[in-house]
Image (cartoon, grey):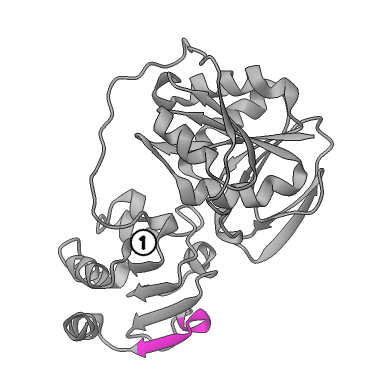
Amino acid sequence: MAVLLLADVNGAQLATDAVAKALTAVKSLGEVHLLVAGPASAAAEAAKLEGAAKVLHAEDAGHGLAESLADLIVSLAGGYSHIAAPATAFSKNVLPRVAALLDVMVLSDVTAVVDADTFERPIYAGNAIQTVKSGDAKKVFTVRTAAFAAAGNGGSAGVEAVAAKASDLSAWVEDRVAASDRPELTSAKVVVSGGRGVGSKESFDLIEKLADKLGAAVGASRAAVDSGYAPNDWQVGQTGKVVAPQLYVAVGISGAIQHLAGMKDSKIIVAINTDEEAPIFQVADDGVVADLFTAVPDLTGKL
């Protein structure tokens, strides 16, 4: 058996952390071939990952459009028993299309590979683990990367060019990229998140200042995002991003089950909240019952 692993490429950069962790997840299934749709530099970076047997490089793949990538993957699918990708927004846009074209099911957020047919994934906001056995000839699934360690960087896989597939369903117009000096949320070692308790978009500046002091990424609860305090791509939780940093600081977040599903695997959780009965304190390693508008500036100043 062989596995085709779709690699995330952001602009010209390989999303190395996510791809390396997904590689760890699938390498027990057989020889792993990485599909890189992007510049040659990203393919060269992927070739260094330990456990990758080959890198398939599609230089002109329609600017990463899901429709074009799905057609490309289906054209390559004949030689693979498994088609996988990290569970990112990019891959969750591509793999369901692949599964539909192949007429098979898609498994999302796999946290453990039991055997070639059997996988584990969280359900009910992470409160239960579902074991799924698939009878499909080809298994299509995304991997929740927070559950796996990253593969090393000492590989030397060969790079093979593949022809990209053009799609009539969509066309690239332009890229609009928000630049930031902060680390990417899903791979950051430290995350500072704000919730509804922050109170306003202007007050979220407190969260950002603390994050900058810690060299951290900034996150937000769904309540904060829905209230317009923070952009959508900062959302952590069941309907946002799943993170597992070394340190997670939750400021003004009550700890709804949907939010906990996205951060409870963090190594150390620190909570700041005025309500000592808030559910967030049940998962926190350290809790501060205090007014965030006093505690956060004090903490930032001491740092």
Q: Position of residue 72 (x, y in %)?
A: 57, 19
Q: Say left or right for 133 vs 34.
A: right
The residue depicted at 46 percent of the width and 14 percent of the height is 169
Residue 140 is situated, as x and y percent measured from the top left of the image, at 68, 36
Residue type highlighted by circle 1: Ala
Whether residue 152 appears in magenta in the rendering, the answer is no
**Position of 294 relative to 183 (above/below):** below
Q: What residue would you read off at disc 1?
A: 223
Q: Pinpoint residue 83: horizontal percent, then vertical percent.
A: 67, 34
Task: Decide: few, some or many residues near mark 1? Use Cα within 10 Å; few <14, some 14-19, many ≥20.
Answer: some
Residue 285 falls inside the magenta stretch: yes
For the record, the magenta segment spans 281-288
Q: Nearer the viewer, residue 297 or 64?
A: 64
User: Is 22 on the left-hand or right-hand side of 117?
Assistant: left
Image quadrant where one finds the C terminus: bottom left
Q: Name the side, left or right, on which 267 lies relative to 172.
A: right
Image quarter hosting the N terminus = top right
Check disc 1 and report its element: helix, strand or loop.
helix
Count of marks overlaid on the render: 1
In front here: 109 or 7? Answer: 7
Residue at the spot 37% in from the left edge and 74% down from the top edge:
250
In the orientation shown, which residue stands out farthest toward the right?
Answer: 135
- Give the residue drawn at x 23%, y 84%: 299
Q: Which quadrant of the structure image shows residue 10?
A: top left
Q: Residue 294: x, y in percent?
A: 19, 85
Front residue of 235/151: it is 151
